Amino acid sequence: MRRAGRGICVATLMLVAGCTSRSPAERSDVPASRDPAAATAALPATWARLGVGRPVDAARLAAWDVDVDTLGAGLPRGRGTVVEGARLYAAKCAACHGSTGEGLPPVYPRLVGRVPRDGFGFAADPSLERTIGNYWPYATTLYDYIRRAMPYGAPGTLSADETYAVTAHLLAANGIIAADASLDSASLVAVRMPAHGRFVADARAPGQP
């Protein structure tokens, strides 16, 4: 049995070696170039050969290129009030996150809450719930997330004005802006989140572990 097992292993190794001994140029499943840019440039031809994908025109690409960074770059024109946001939240968000932002665990997270107000003990106490009020570092990226990913089941359907309004409502519900406030690109950038100072910039170079 030992000899037979050894023979099977040797035969298997020879078979694998025979399948992988060809150079990349001789194999259709390995790109001839290891240059990422060249590999990316070759993708459309590959997609066409496989019958998948389609070219993306500038208008379609612009519709998806809506991300907003921490400094507010990418924020669109528009305006929304806390009052308007409360109505929108009740219609489009409360079914998942609760009427007051309390969340519906274990799937839908809590959005409103300022506990703990002092300290930042999330690492020491995993039971603490992370909310917009006690954990989220930038108001601009809150807008970005809502605009691109919410509401659940229909992401990206909120207009710029509606997104400003929902963001305003959630910030007011967390006691971060006034209940009669309105938000636009300038005022949103000026909002300083309670947890802002708890985060540090990642100084690592791209690709550095």
Image: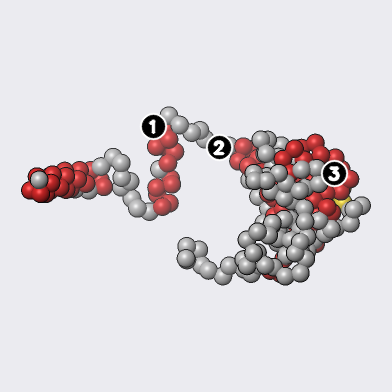
Residue pointed to by mark 3: 86
Which mark is nearer the camera, 1 or 3? 3
Q: Look at the picture and state if 90 lies above or below 168.
A: above
Residue pointed to by mark 2: 56
Tell which circle, 3 or 2, labels the residue nearer the N-terminal end. Answer: 2
Q: How has the structure been colored for display?
A: secondary structure
Label 3 close to label 2 by CB (< 8 Å)? no
Q: Is residue 82 visible?
A: yes
In the image, residue 72 lies at what x, y percent? 72, 57
Kindly identify the amino acid type of the residue bearing the numbered disc 1: Arg
Which residue is painted at 38% across and 32% down in the image?
49
Kindly identify the amino acid type of the residue bearing the numbered disc 3: Ala
Which residue is painted at 43% across and 35% down in the image?
47
Residue pointed to by mark 1: 49
Q: Report the Cα–Cα distance between label 3 and label 2.
A: 37 Å
Q: Is residue 18 visible?
A: no
Tell which circle, 1 or 3, labels the residue nearer the N-terminal end. Answer: 1
Which residue is painted at 33% across and 50% down in the image?
33
